[in-house]
Amino acid sequence: VAGLIDHTLLKPDATRQEIERLCREAVEHQFATVCVNPAWVRLCASLLRGSQAGVCAVVGFPLGATTPDVKNFETRRVLFDGAREVDMVINIGALKSNDLRTVERDIEAVTAPCLDCGATSKVIIEAAYLTDEEKVTACALAKAAGATFVKTSTGFGPGGATVADVALMRRVGGDDMGVKAAGGVRDL
């Protein structure tokens, strides 16, 4: 199971020592990645070089309320710094406003550079804020944009992963797109 886990430290007051410990634990337990804020990507890539653990960076995190061009730049930067996975938060307000073109551009701003360099992209839909219909729409837009995964939550919103949300996301994504349960997952 460890190889499926993104060992995560996203708190704003994370110290260098905590990030170094995160990387040591990822190697020791053979986690898939460390998931960190963009400022730590270069350090993590250096510390994990030669190990099985990769670096995952968050983009537009945790609110998703930045513009597509900013998310695109942030994505290209973390990829340049050594991230091999990017977890982006959608523009939740645009989705709830039914401004689907903005959401589509938002997601594509991240998935396009990831596709260009073979990196994994995960689209965080922050399901706790959404109706089931909005969840379906978000997943469909992520799939159309070429996202590798859809993800339930940032862990910073009002709720985390639920079995019902994971099932809904799997149904919409089919076999072509992965589903990542995140937020509040504490055991098998």
Image: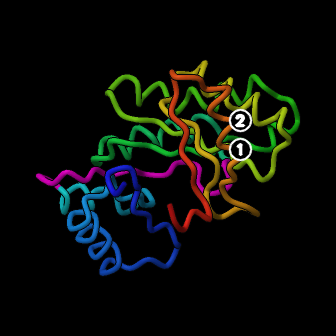
**Residue underneath mark 1:** 165
- The amino acid marked with disc number 2 is Leu
Q: Position of residue 46 (x, y in %)?
A: 18, 58
Q: Is 44 covered by the magenta stretch?
A: no
Q: Is 54 covered by the magenta stretch?
A: yes
Prevailing secondary structure class for the magenta stretch in the rendered image: loop
The 10 Å Cα crowd at callout 2, few under 14, some 14 to 19, many 20 or more, is: some
In this picture, which residue range is highlighted in magenta? 49-64
Q: Position of residue 115 (x, y in %)?
A: 40, 24
In this rendering, position of residue 48 left or right of residue 16: left
Q: Position of residue 112 (x, y in %)?
A: 47, 24
Q: Residue at left 58%, top 54%?
A: 61
In this rendering, position of residue 188 left or right of residue 62: left
Q: Which of the pair 164/152 is nearer the observer? A: 164
Q: Is residue 43 visible?
A: no
Q: Position of residue 26 (x, y in %)?
A: 28, 64
